Amino acid sequence: MTKRVLLAAPRGYCAGVDRAVRIVERALEACGPPVYVRKEIVHNRHVVAELGGRGAVFVDSVDDIPEGSVCVFSAHGVSPEVRRRAARRRLRVIDATCPLVTKVHNEAKRFARAGRALVLVGHRGHEEIEGTSGEAPEVTHVISTVDEVERLPLRRDEPVAYLTQTTLSVDDTLEVVEALRARFRDIVGPRKDDICYATQNRQVAVKAIARECDVVLVVGALNSSNSNRMVEVARRQGVPAYLVPEPAALCPEWLEGAETVGVSSGASAPEVLVAGLLARLAELGYEDVHTRTVTTEDVSFSLPPRLREDRPAELTGVRPAG
């Protein structure tokens, strides 16, 4: 049996994750440790552990941060209430919110000001959903499935707007949005699809390689929404697929009888974990690796002005929140 690996591209870090990680690194260089980070900067324990070893301290709440300290908001964004609490503690805030998440926050505020009820499609409890819904909590309803559309406590003729979490499955989201449009007579959505370019590209790449694979492995954290959606996309192609948080988590039993193994990684998974998984696969006889590229990415997001390397005089001048 000829054993081979199909390696999907693009995969791994998106521009928002890369920016968020670089922000913590630059904050540590500029301000010195400790730098406090609210929640995981991105959903990957390897990244969190590596930054923690350099002096980043991860906390669940800004209330856990000593007054006046440097605080980084994660890539998933925060609600206005979190910002207010940070201001009361005079924290020196550096905002690592992904610009694409900020876009969704701005849309939520715009729709709320227009007097529309807001339906937010996403996963309850996810940091991104908590942050976005916090922009207009009194008019926001969170749903995740088509079945929940009919249970919304809204009139059919009520002005409604919908927004979506950036890391959802493209196919699932389309079904929910179609159900919303079918129910409500006066409904509007974002000017451009909220699901981020990287999430879409990684799902398309997984779908493409899954057709040629006997099993698909996605490197990503258990709490990574976009990584879990990639596994679901592969399974919908009729292929067994598994989430692999780290190379040691690979079960050889998953590969029994498999000639071609597909490999990709979520938007918050560093390439070092992919390399580790490929090394484990090589030990199991899957040494022949072919990269399948479905598109190329050239998106990048700049760092906050005070953290840019060309402005060293401002690196320690992080103003208090508010």
Image: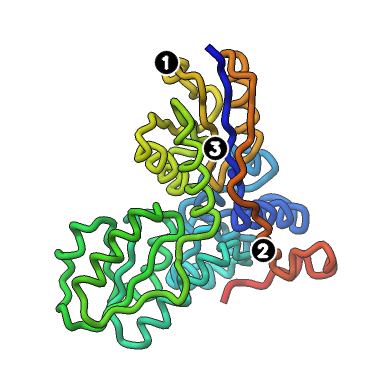
- Residue 135 or 17: which is nearer the viewer? 17
Image location (x, y in percent) of residue 144: 28, 57
**Decide: marks 2, 3 in contact (CB < 8 A)?**
no
User: What residue is rendered at 64% in x and 22% in y?
Assistant: 288
Regarding residue 94, the answer to whether it shows in the image is: yes
Q: Is residue 239 left or right of residue 270?
A: left
Colouring rule applied to residues: rainbow
Residue 264 tag number: 3
Q: Quadrant of residue 302?
A: bottom right
> What is the CA distance from the residue labelled 1 to the residue labelled 2?
41 Å
User: What residue is rendered at 61% in x and 14% in y?
Assistant: 283
Q: Does residue 73 lie above or below 267 as drawn? A: below
Residue 301 tag number: 2
- Residue 45 or 29: which is nearer the viewer? 45
Mark toward the start of the polypeptide (2 vs 3): 3
Q: Amino acid at mark 3?
A: Ser
Q: Is residue 173 left or right of residue 287?
A: left
Q: Does residue 148 lie above or below 106 as drawn? A: above
Regarding residue 62, the answer to whether it shows in the image is: no
Q: Is residue 160 left or right of residue 297?
A: left
Q: Residues within 10 Å of mark 2 (few under 14, many from 20)?
A: some
Mark toward the start of the polypeptide (3 vs 1): 1
Q: Name the secondary structure under disc 3.
A: strand
> What is the CA distance from the residue labelled 2 to the residue labelled 3?
23 Å
Q: Quadrant of the C terminus?
A: bottom right
Location of mark 1 (residue): 253
User: What residue is rendered at 50% in x and 19% in y?
Assistant: 259
User: What residue is rendered at 45% in x and 77% in y?
Assistant: 191
Q: Amino acid at mark 2?
A: Phe
Mark toward the start of the polypeptide (1 vs 2): 1
- Residue 108 or 7: which is nearer the viewer? 7
Q: Amino acid at mark 1?
A: Glu
